Amino acid sequence: MSTMSKDVEQVLRQLFKRLNPLMLWHWRLGMGPYINFWPEGIGRFVVLVHTGRKSGRTYRTPVNYAEIAGDVYVTAGFGKIADWYRNVIANPRIEVWLPDGRWQADVEDVTGSDQHTAVMREVLKGSGFAAYLSGLNPKAMSDAELNTATAAYRLLRIRRVAPCAGPGGPGDLVWLWPALVAVAWVAGLAWPRRRRTSA
C-alpha cells in the first residue's frame, strides 16, 4: 500500500487475517447476506472459494466488493503479493458466495481498464472501515489522489457462470444454531440452581 509504511501495512495484514475467519463464520452460519447491512461502516462482503496454486487445496477468502452492471468487482489491497490474488490468477474459475446465492464464476484482472478509477472507488466505498484504516477516503479523494494511493492495488472482475449446489457452501454450519440454543437453555436452567446452592 503506497500510502503507509511497511510496518503499518504489516499490522493491517495481521488484523485482516484475524477478522477474515469471523466473516467466514458469519457466512457458514447462514448470516452472510446480513453482514452487508451497513456497507459504509462494516463493509460489503463476499466469499471467494479458490484453489491453491501450489497446494491444490481449497481456500475461502472474504473480500469487500461492489456490484456494477451485473459483474462483481473486488480489489487486492496488498497487490500481487496477496496469496488469494495469486491463486485466482493461476486458477481463475472460482466459486463466489454472494447475497443472491452461490455461483461458479470466472475472475479477470482488469487493473488499468477504462473504468478502473470509477470502479475502484466503488469497491473502496464497499470496504467500509477497511478503506479508512488503509488511509483512504474514497468519497473525498480526487481521481488523481485515488490512483496514486492505490497504485499497487489490483482490480478484479468476477463474472457469474452458473449457480452452485452441494455441500460445503454458505450456511453449511447453520445446524449449530439449534445446538447453541439448547446449550443456552440448559445453562439457563442450571443457573438458578447454582445460585441457590451457593447461597
Image: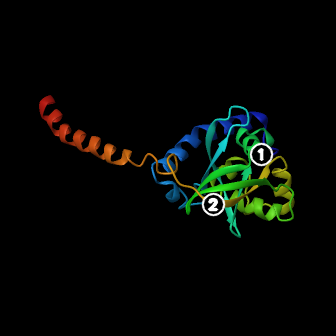
**Quadrant location of the N terminus?**
top right
User: Circle 1 sits on which residue?
Assistant: 89
**Quadrant location of the C terminus?**
top left
For image coordinates 73% across by 37% down, the residue present is 53
Q: Is residue 144 left or right of residue 7?
A: right
Residue 4 at x, y percent in the picture: 78, 42
Secondary element under disc 1, as helix, strand or loop, is helix
Describe the colour scheme in one phrase: rainbow
For image coordinates 78% across by 54% down, the residue present is 108
Q: Is residue 177 left or right of residue 169?
A: left
The three-letter amino acid code for the residue at tag 2 is: Ala
User: Circle 2 sits on which residue?
Assistant: 162
Secondary element under disc 2, as helix, strand or loop, is strand
Q: Is residue 156 left or right of residue 17?
A: right
The three-letter amino acid code for the residue at tag 1 is: Ile
In this rendering, is residue 11 above or below 112?
above
